[in-house]
Image: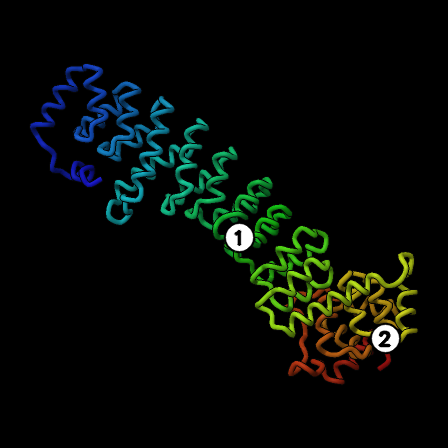
């Protein structure tokens, strides 16, 4: 590499150069091939051979470390596929030594040629470039962005899955374009995945892609995205175990997960060392209670009959209400809230659909604790975290008696 830069910037042997010119003028094929292969050949002669040599000579020039980089643009459009493939390998090997700051012009020549090869109409050339660049952290971003969008899977997949030079902005743009499943899955398996890209992977709706993301220890998943994944995982059992093992799983999200997972996933949660003993015990208790809730009653028992059964046994509590909501039994939940509050089912439904304040007032009327009321807002009111009203001081109702009375009167409910 040092000898190459020395030739580019001066320091060649004049006598040797004269001898090489004489051999070039002689036109002997063996001599020309020897010149094309020799690292001692003057860059000017190599450039000439890149333009006028035989296919074999041009290929030798393409891989010769002494070939001037500005010859790359010429070789990138060579008629020979083998020449273009050889050039791709040589340029990639050259990149680590071509600092954009120190060798700006040479770097620009190399990137220009690589960009041309990335658009080559021959699949073999693009594939060779892709499989070589996939492991280069300093690969030119415009080049890898082009390869990542290639229509051929064998070209784009190595870049999508492995190339760390591929920018998040490019991946987000690709994921917005409703890509095929293998594209989503390749990105989901990258050594590192940012929170923004993880969110975009989930939003594609590709279930295998999300499963791969959840199993990827190098992926960062925001709490908001993990919350959405948990809600969706009610109907995707394959996600339960990897969700339960995610390092981002908070106690709050773990409790949400306990609403519908089976005993095997419970064992995973019980073994999490980042949850203290009391938290693990609480999670176990919730899961066991909710599993038992599902077992009770006959398969043909109606929501009305279930409410009456719990009421008669004096077991119609806020915990039972939360168990029902965790299994998405909204009909039972509405009837249970009606029974507990004395508000008609139709009015209960209206209040649940009207936002956090009416729900808080309804919970107060039903005798539900302020902290539990937050869960009712989330599960029955389907409210987002930013919409929730939390207890004052962690223990008191967030609305004043006057506010609660106003909410109840607005819906025609007597205090």
Quadrant location of the N terminus in the rendered image: top left
Seen in the picture, residue 302 relative to 308 is either above or below; the reply is above
Task: Name the spot of residue 152 as percent of width and height, x first.
Answer: 51, 33
Counting the numbered discs, the total is: 2
Colour scheme: rainbow
Q: Nearer the viewer, residue 178 or 413?
A: 178
- Mark 2 to mark 1: distance in Å? 45 Å
Location of mark 1 (residue): 197
Task: Name the spot of residue 221 as percent of width and height, x first.
Answer: 56, 58
Report the residue that reaches farthest toward the bottom. Answer: 401
Task: Name the spot of residue 84 as percent of width and height, x first.
Answer: 35, 28
Q: Earlier in the sequence, mark 2 or mark 1?
A: 1
Q: Please tell me in which quadrant of the rendered image residue 224 appears.
A: bottom right
Seen in the picture, residue 244 relative to 93 is either above or below; the reply is below
Task: Name the spot of residue 394 as percent of width and height, x first.
Answer: 66, 81
Residue 153, numbered circle? none
* Relative horizontal placement of residue 335, taking residue 77 as reference (left or right): right
As helix, strand or loop, the secondary structure at mark 1 comes to helix
Location of mark 2 (residue): 340
């Amino acid at each position: 590499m040092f000898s190459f830069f020395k030739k580019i910037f001066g320091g060649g042997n004049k006598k040797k150069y004269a001898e090489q010119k004489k051999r070039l003028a002689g036109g002997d094929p063996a001599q020309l091939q020897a010149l094309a292969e020799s690292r001692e050949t003057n860059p000017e002669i190599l450039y000439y051979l890149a333009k006028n040599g035989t296919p074999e000579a041009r290929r030798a020039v393409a891989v010769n470390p002494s070939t001037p980089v500005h010859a790359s643009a010429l070789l990138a459009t060579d008629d020979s596929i083998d020449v273009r493939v050889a050039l791709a390998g040589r340029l990639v090997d050259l990149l680590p030594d071509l600092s954009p700051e120190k060798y700006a012009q040479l770097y620009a020549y190399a990137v220009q040629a690589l960009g041309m090869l990335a658009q080559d109409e021959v699949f073999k050339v693009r594939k060779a470039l892709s499989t070589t660049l996939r492991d280069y952290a300093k690969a030119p971003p415009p080049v890898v962005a082009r390869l990542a969008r290639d229509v051929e899977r064998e070209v784009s997949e190595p870049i999508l899955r492995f190339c760390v030079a591929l920018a998040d902005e490019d991946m987000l743009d690709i994921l917005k374009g409703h890509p095929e499943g293998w594209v989503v899955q390749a990105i989901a398996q990258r050594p590192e995945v940012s929170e923004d890209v993880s969110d975009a992977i989930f939003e594609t709706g590709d279930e295998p892609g999300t499963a791969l993301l959840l199993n990827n220890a190098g992926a960062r998943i925001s709490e908001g995205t993990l919350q959405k994944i948990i809600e969706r995982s009610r109907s995707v059992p394959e996600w339960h175990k990897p969700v339960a093992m995610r390092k981002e799983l908070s106690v709050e999200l773990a409790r949400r997960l306990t609403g519908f997972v089976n005993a095997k996933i419970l064992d995973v949660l019980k073994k999490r060392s980042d949850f203290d003993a009391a938290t693990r015990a609480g999670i176990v208790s919730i899961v066991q209670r909710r599993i038992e809730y599902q077992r009770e009653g006959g398969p043909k028992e109606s929501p009305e009959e279930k409410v009456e059964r719990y009421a008669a046994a004096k077991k119609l509590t806020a915990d039972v209400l939360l168990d029902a909501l965790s299994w998405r039994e909204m009909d039972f939940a509405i009837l249970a809230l009606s029974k507990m509050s004395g508000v008609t089912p139709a009015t209960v439904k209206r209040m649940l659909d009207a936002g956090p304040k009416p729900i808080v007032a309804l919970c107060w009327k039903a005798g539900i604790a302020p902290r539990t009321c937050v869960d009712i807002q989330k599960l029955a009111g389907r409210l987002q975290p930013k919409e929730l009203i939390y207890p004052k001081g962690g223990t008191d109702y967030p609305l004043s008696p006057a506010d609660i009375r106003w909410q109840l009167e607005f819906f025609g409910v007597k205090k």
